Image (cartoon, helix red, strand yellow):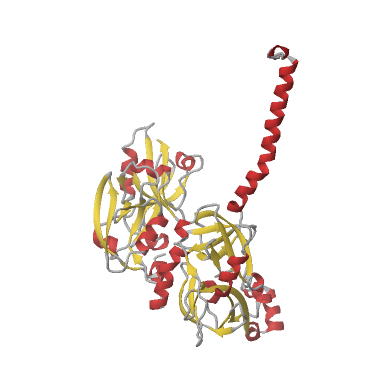
Amino acid sequence: MMAKFDLRPHGTRWGALALVLTLTVVFGLAASQPAAAKSVAPRMVPESFHGLAQMVGPSVVNIRTVKTMKGGGPVFRHFNQNPWGKNHPFNEFFERFFGGEEFQREFKQRSLGSGFIISDDGFVVTNNHVIEDADEITVKLAGGDEFEARIVGRDPNTDLALIRIESKDRFPAISLGDSDGLKVGEWVVAIGSPFGLEQTVTAGIVSAKGRVIGSGPYDDFIQTDASINPGNSGGPLINMNGEVVGINTAIIAAGQGIGFAVPINMARNVIEQLRQHGEVTRGWLGVAIQELDDEMAEYYGVEKGEGVFVAQVFEGDPADAAGIRAGDIIVSVDGKKVSTTRELTGLIAGIPVGEEATVLVLREGKKKQFVVEIAKREEEKIASRKSTSKETTDDLGIQVADIDAEMASRFGATEGEGVIVVGVENGSKGQEAGIRRGDIIREINHGQIRSSQEYHDAIAGIDAGETVSMFVRRMNAGFLVVKMTK
């Protein structure tokens, strides 16, 4: 019987058998795909968010505020800015038809936001911008009950606020989760009142973590594509366990599916301080800092991201008292490595006022350790920190002058800090390298420059064809290294 089968590799019978086997495998795989997909889908895509919404919805509130504004209302906001200048004829026109006093009349501005209850005795978390300068704050619960709220405390730096409502009854509080444990791609849900539409539930994923969007010194946002719109501000971002992992705070106006939430782990300390003291106290080191770019890292002989550059030390503040100097590179605080200005600011802010911190710096290639007693960060003081000289030109086409008291005041410098560039010749080596008028040259090839005489002596000591590395401070840009060949 066996002899009747043709088992040659290219025989007709073998080919038919191979075809049958191939089709069986292909169709078998195709048939198995839906079953595999069905088995994976429930774990990847929630079947419903209904249970989650029902569980946390009662803790999410709608916030309405009334603010007293001046300037004739939103319709006149543009005109109130006087875009034509002081003596333009249009000013007389508006004075005649609207009147000076009438034009500045008060009006009531109403706004909407969201929040969530964190304790059964009525403490509610929201955004600072939702309730800032509000004359009246009304909190509406999911069931329709309304309460007048009072401000417990605000923190503009993180855009967080704590308000309170009171009743003889207990309020439904929501649980706080762990934002550090969030993973990119994880499902999250936003609940709030976008455009006043209360108890709106939207779902999405964590798009990114640690986003810096330029809103303040403590930027560390969770990015999500869960739909967030005006009115969602202050509402919770919730994980699949029904815990708050973020406070919805910002959106990109021109974008879709790009929203930002303050991580709850960052907010915890802020909320607790507001609850206990009505304000937030942060640590202050007393330095102006910036990150190291490639050129500066090369100039100082360190790896990029290995520390933060100290641009300025404020006289009389903790760093100054401890012996830290401008030009030092802070590499760690209390043993925790520092690679960005945001990391350093966050570490110092979290150290209680009056406690000592161990700060490790690099100075001239050597490590030095300082013990600093942390002071209180005072925002107003920090914000406030914000010639007869002989001018000569060198063969690099750079014209410099000494920094006198008037120049120091104008450019936020100190006398003897360096020399200021007052001119750069067109087509010169200095211009090609990127030197600009107003730059303050502080070092040349690691040598400190305190006067125009020291500057010219340094340039004269460099042979033709050699590299000139200038350590420069530039207004609104910080410190940089400019290199050229003499």
Asked if residue 99 lies left or right of residue 133, the reply is right
Q: Position of residue 113 (x, y in %)?
A: 59, 73
Is residue 391 visible in this depiction of the protein? no
Residue 69, quarter of the rendered image? bottom right
Where 238 sits versus 132, above or below? Answer: above
Q: Nearer the viewer, residue 22 or 284?
A: 22
Q: Nearer the viewer, residue 396 or 335?
A: 335
Report the quarter where the C terminus lies. Answer: top left
Q: Position of residue 375 (x, y in %)?
A: 31, 68
Asked if residue 447 lies left or right of residue 80, the reply is left
Which residue is depicted at the point 58% across and 72% down? 57
Which residue, as the protein is rendered here, is positioned at the far bottom? 168
Residue 79, quarter of the rendered image? bottom right
Asked if residue 325 lies left or right of residue 114, the reply is left
Asked if residue 400 lies left or right of residue 175, the reply is left
Q: Nearer the viewer, residue 147 or 255?
A: 147
Where 446 sits versus 316, above or below? Answer: above
Residue 104, quarter of the rendered image? bottom right
